[in-house]
Image (tube, rainbow, N blue to C red):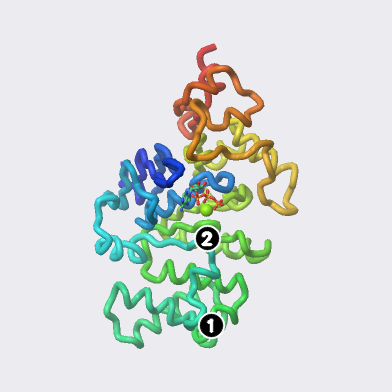
Amino acid sequence: MAQRTLEVSHLNTSFFTERGEVKAVQDVSISVGKGQVVGIVGESGCGKSMIARSVMGLVKKPGKIVSGSITLEGKELTSLSEKELCKVRGRDVSMVFQEPMTSLNPTMRVGKQVQEVIAIHESLPKEEARRRTLEMLSAVGIPEVEARYSAYPHELSGGLRQRVMIAMAMVMRPRLLIADEPTTALDATVETQIIALLKQLAKDGTSVLIISHNLGVIAQLADYVYVMYAGRIVEKGSVFELFDNPSHPYTHGLLGAVSSLRSQTKVLQTIPGVVPNLAHLPAGCSFAPRCKECMAKCGSEQPKLITVNSEHEVCCHLIEGADEL
Ligand SMILES: Nc1ncnc2c1ncn2[C@@H]1O[C@H](COP(=O)(O)OP(=O)(O)OP(=O)(O)O)[C@@H](O)[C@H]1O
Ligand SMILES: [Mg+2]
């Protein structure tokens, strides 16, 4: 099998707080191939960003990767020192963060901010770095790049700022781009443009891990989808399989919420109940307290991942039961 760009295996990331261990990511395995767009979807607080931060080596105290492996083109990242990670970040793997305004420096011209990423990784003559920056700003669809190079973040629209963020992430041509909620703060038209841009990057060979609580965005972009609930992957499959044939009651809930809304707001609506406290997870399936189809063993036994078909796996006792019949 060809080497995968990203391979996350049995990752566990926790926060060690005064109130106990908060298991933000539990036994998560994710794989992204070259030029593939892989999506992670799930409600707020289910651990999506913590997976991304774990890959980037940016889990802050009291958080910590407890166990598991993360490889980028076969190279283990979890054992790298901070110095080694600094070389990898931005060059081999980069991330567009969830908070676009806080991720750009408000006091620095945007062109300089992109150029600074080059300076961290390569010693290029200033003129060459500037040329490459302008080329990248233009490649992400920013018009009149010479003028925009000198703009401060507040002088740009939300859509342009997001493009600058993507330019910063892409300027070293990383193998993997992680985009955490890249369109959440944008209106529908700009969202469509950013989706098209990410698709183009993947076509050009960049692997993309896209994180969103918006199933519409995932459906348009991803080839393969992981559904997360309370720190775990509960269902995974090719985008067609998952949307056509969802098996987990939670995925049903997410899809139901979207179709009931049609395309008006496209944000997930609520499934009755709330995500459990990750410091005090129920013994069995974490979704059991909210699940309409909950059976006795769901409250006591953690379900295993079951193969639905070659493109689809699910973690649910209901499907196990169907298998046994
Ligand atoms: N500093 C922290 N201390 C303790 N727990 C934390 C901390 N940061 C995150 N967590 C825990 O990790 C969980 C997962 O957080 P994460 O940011 O990955 O969620 P998310 O799925 O990205 O949510 P959203 O859609 O809102 O961005 C949270 O529910 C929270 O319990
Ligand atoms: Mg998040």
For the C terminus, the quadrant is top right
At numbered mark 1, what does the secondary structure look like: helix, strand or loop? loop
Residue at the spot 60% in from the left edge and 29% down from the top edge:
289
Q: CA distance from mark 2 to mark 1?
A: 20 Å
In-front residue for pair 309/263: 263
Q: Is residue 168 above or below residue 78?
A: below
* Residue 276 - label: none
Identified at 44% across, 61% down, the residue is 95
Query: Residue 120, how many percent across, how many down?
Result: 31, 74
- Asked if marks 2 and 1 touch (Cβ < 8 Å), the reply is no
The residue positioned 61% from the left and 23% from the top of the image is 294
Amino acid type of the residue tagged 1 in the rendering = Tyr
Q: Nearer the viewer, residue 57 or 124?
A: 57
In the figure, 209 relative to 120: above or below? above
> Which residue is the site of mark 1?
152
- Badge 1 crowding class, 10 Å Cα cut-off, few under 14, some 14 to 19, many 20 or more, is some
Cβ of mark 2 under 8 Å from ligand 2: the answer is yes
Left or right: 166 in relation to 43: left
State the residue in front, 202 or 297: 297
In percent of the image, x 43 and y 49: which residue is there? 51
Q: Is residue 156 left or right of residue 61?
A: right
Residue 307 in the image, given as x and y percentages of width and height: 46, 27
* Residue 112, position as x, y percentages in the image: 43, 82
Where is residue 183? Give x, y as percent: 59, 60
Residue type highlighted by circle 2:
Gln
Q: Dividing the image into 4 quarters, which one contains the N terminus?
A: top left
Instruction: Judge the density around disc 2: few (<14), some (14-19), many (≥20) Cα neighbours within 10 Å.
Output: some
Q: Which mark is residue 98?
A: 2
Left or right, residue 282 beside residue 269: left
**Mark found first going from the N terminus, 2 or 1:** 2
The relative height of residue 304 versus residue 190 in the rendered view (above or below) is above
Q: Secondary structure at mark 2?
A: loop
